[in-house]
Image: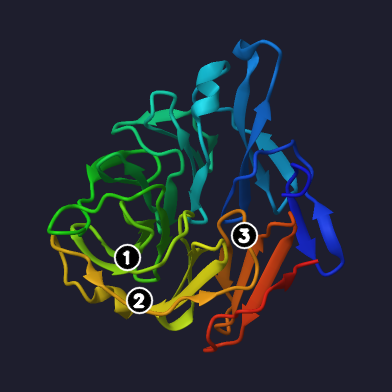
Amino acid sequence: MRGGRAAVLRDSGWEDLGGPALLPSLAAAGTRLYGVHPVLTADPDGHRRDLYCLDRDTGAWEDLGNPAGAGPAARTVGQPAAADDGATAVACLRHPDGGLAVRTRTAGGWSEWARLEGPAVHEAPAAVGAAGAFTIVAATPDNIAAWEGDGTAWTHRNLDLPGADGAAHIPAGAVTAAQAPDGRIVIASRAAGSSDVVLHLGRGDAWTGVRVPLEGGILSPALALGPDGALAVVCDDGSGAPAVLVLDLADLEASGSGAGDAALLSRPWTRGDVTVLKRPAAAFGSDGSLRLWALAADGELWTAQAGPGAPPPVGWEPAA
């Protein structure tokens, strides 16, 4: 985002992607980019928060509307989530009643908005999908809820992930998710009552959990999966610096499966030398190199990189 518009950084500099002004929260899935366009009028009944979709293959933007229409309810849709398996795309926003609503794109085009059965959720869900199977997860006041389906038919359940003292894990805020090549899902969140990061791995009814101590910070963790089971976890610490941890998926299997406590996993975080305003982003290259990005306190995009197998980087520099 630059000046309220979607932009991409290329070797030649920043390129405006066109489209409308967007709120500073984007979702990318497959070859599509999603963002919420705010419409503000003197009359609050005219306010809107419409979801726009950019087809990065064609450069065309499409207005997907929102599940709330216009007026005060439209301001409750929150941040978008999206997933794409190459044949089907799913876009998700919060419904005005606090639940979730989705639109699904198949060969016939986009469906209408559909309210999913289930509880009220925090404003930032997460979605993953592969081979016709999609999962949307979101934090609720007392659990983490999951919706599973093919994009058109959905089932809902509470995950009851391993937490503290044998109770189900209650996240302190929004959750994030990434899908491993074997179909399992990694879910990351902050622990209620602390700033520790909690990571869960599993699918169906078999889940493991680990709790990684971290001093301070408020941002939900970002996740990236790399070759050979590498997992990067990125958030912020109490000083506002980016905190980075690289694990193996096998490290998340320490607590066994099913109900029970999340195991303690003490690992040192690498702290960057900038102050971040929003959750950093991370990605692995095909060779296993790790690249990080974050909006810093000066309002500019900063980046850091580590080679294959190298420790997470400490030094950050302006991206452009």
> Pointers 2 and 1 in contact (CB under 8 A)?
yes
Pick the residue in front: 199 or 64.
199
Residue 120, percent from left and from top: 33, 32
Q: Which amino acid does label 1 sit on?
A: Arg
Q: Which residue lies furthest to the front in this view?
A: 239
> Pointers 3 and 1 in contact (CB under 8 A)?
no
Tell me if residue 268 comes above or below residue 149 in the rendering: below
Q: Which of marks 2 and 3 is nearer the N terminus?
A: 2
Residue 292, percent from left and from top: 61, 70
Numbered disc 2: secondary structure: helix
Numbered disc 1: secondary structure: loop
CA distance separating discs 2 and 1: 10 Å
Residue that label 2 marks? 249
Tell me if residue 126 comes above or below residue 21 in the rendering: below
Residue 8, percent from left and from top: 75, 57
Numbered disc 3: secondary structure: loop
Label 3 vs label 1, nearer the camera:
3
* Residue under the point 16% across and 72% down: 256
Q: In which quarter of the image is residue 10?
A: bottom right
Residue that label 1 marks? 184
Residue that label 3 marks? 276
Tell me if residue 23 comes above or below residue 244 in the rendering: above
* Residue under the point 45% across and 78% down: 246
Q: Residue furthest right?
A: 12
Residue 162, percent from left and from top: 20, 59
Q: What residue type is labelled 2?
A: Leu
